[in-house]
Amino acid sequence: MRKRKVPDVVIRRLPLYLRVLSDLDPESSSIVSSYELGARTGVTPGQIRKDLSFFGVFGKQGVGYEVTILREELRRILKLDRVVNAGLVGVGNLGQAFLHYGADRQKEVLSREGLRMRAAFDQDERKIGGHVAGVEVYPVQRLPELIKELPLMIIILTVPAEAAQVVFDRCVASGVKAFLNFAPVKLEIPPGIRVRHADFTLELESLAYYSKEWEEDEGEKNFQSRTDQ
Amino acid sequence: MRKRKVPDVVIRRLPLYLRVLSDLDPESSSIVSSYELGARTGVTPGQIRKDLSFFGVFGKQGVGYEVTILREELRRILKLDRVVNAGLVGVGNLGQAFLHYGADRQKEVLSREGLRMRAAFDQDERKIGGHVAGVEVYPVQRLPELIKELPLMIIILTVPAEAAQVVFDRCVASGVKAFLNFAPVKLEIPPGIRVRHADFTLELESLAYYSKEWEEDEGEKNFQSRTDQ
């Protein structure tokens, strides 16, 4: 299959489609239309068809996509048809929370899709050699070696802000191309490396839009009902 | 200003624009074009103009938007021109990590934009009455009372999956309309309530696309260079 340069927004939607397809019972629904996929993901049917066409995947006009075929195709495109090992650096509160989260999800999603929490790293002697949610904690010095040996394809950064760039650079030098960064810092990112920032501030700021306007509850009822839809 | 029903994807982009505007030095750049905003946010200029037009905000053709005016307008639209109190329920690893994250961000972003981490809740006697990152921990029983008293406009759920629905329902009954949910569970959500799910599995699955294909490094070099752009 020839690939064109695919926009990242498209890549970000593929796991959504995959999740819907994985939730569908292939016994009862062997075909899914872009309209059904749209209703379940909140993406317009036209956008879904366009997204999939990037990968040469086309449904049957007026019918839709074969569920099992589309699911396998998406798994292949996302490289989730093989084992994808993830490593986590920084076993503080957030790192531990993430490892437990990963262990919970692994049962239902991660393992099915090929993602594996494979190793954790820290510099705290008391943590090294221990396990968190079944994942071994290694000394951070062994990061370059274990990236290549295990190997680790995705690195999750849960280190303090001041350590993030150094750890990131070391991982990039060892060949890692994909990162999920929780450290509240703007990283210098070389070309060809993909970093997703977990930015909760943006989430909270957009949620503020939907928050109830308590202060204005007493008066201005009219104004309220017009603007607070 | 008359509001039409604004799609959530638009609301989610507003904090991005606001961040860029807040980073701009109003002394040196009093005007910003949709092209510059686009280059800094990764959103197309046309989409930016369309997003802002939902709120009756239009730039000057061929010139752009006045930075200070657009910034204040966005803060007003997002209700960040007033105090927006957030409360967090579940002071485990993730909850503690989030409170520390919030405290770090508050210094640079949260306080400037009106968001406040105002209270935390837990059922663990040993945590109640204590503080995490400067935020007091209250007994979860006081949630309905304090939602109204403080008041709390956004609730962050960092409780275990099995507790999420009960806590969520209690908050909704007390008038909260906006939630950030970290519990890996599908909530039953009544109309008019907005919930954002922090779903790291989707992030990791889309990152897998960009991960290096280690297994195939030895052989198939040709195949690699064609597909792994």
Image (cartoon, coloured by chain):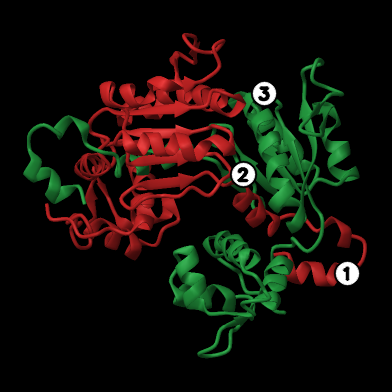
Chain colours: A red, B green
Please, is residue A178 above or below residue A101 in the view? below
Q: Nearer the viewer, mark 2 or mark 3?
A: 3
How far across and how far down the image is residue B189, in percent?
62, 44
Report the Cα–Cα distance between label 1 and label 3. 40 Å
Tag 1 residue: A220
> What element does badge 2 sit on?
loop
Q: Amino acid at mark 1?
A: Glu
> What element does badge 1 sit on?
loop
Please, is residue A68 above or below residue A213 in the view? above
Which residue is the extreme one toward the bottom? B61
Report the Cα–Cα distance between label 2 and label 1. 28 Å
Tag 3 residue: B92
Q: Amino acid at mark 3?
A: Gly
> What element does badge 3 sit on?
loop
Q: Residue at x 82, y 16 (%)?
A: B125
Report the Cα–Cα distance between label 2 and label 3. 24 Å
- Crowding at mark 3 (Cα within 10 Å: few <14, some 14-19, many 20+): some
Q: Are marks 2 and 1 on the same chain?
A: no
Horizontal side of residue B213 vs B132, given as left or right? left
How far across and how far down the image is residue A229, in percent?
69, 65
How far across and how far down the image is residue B22, in percent?
65, 65
Question: Can residue B215 be seen at all in this image of the molecule?
Answer: yes
The chain that hosts pointer 3 is B
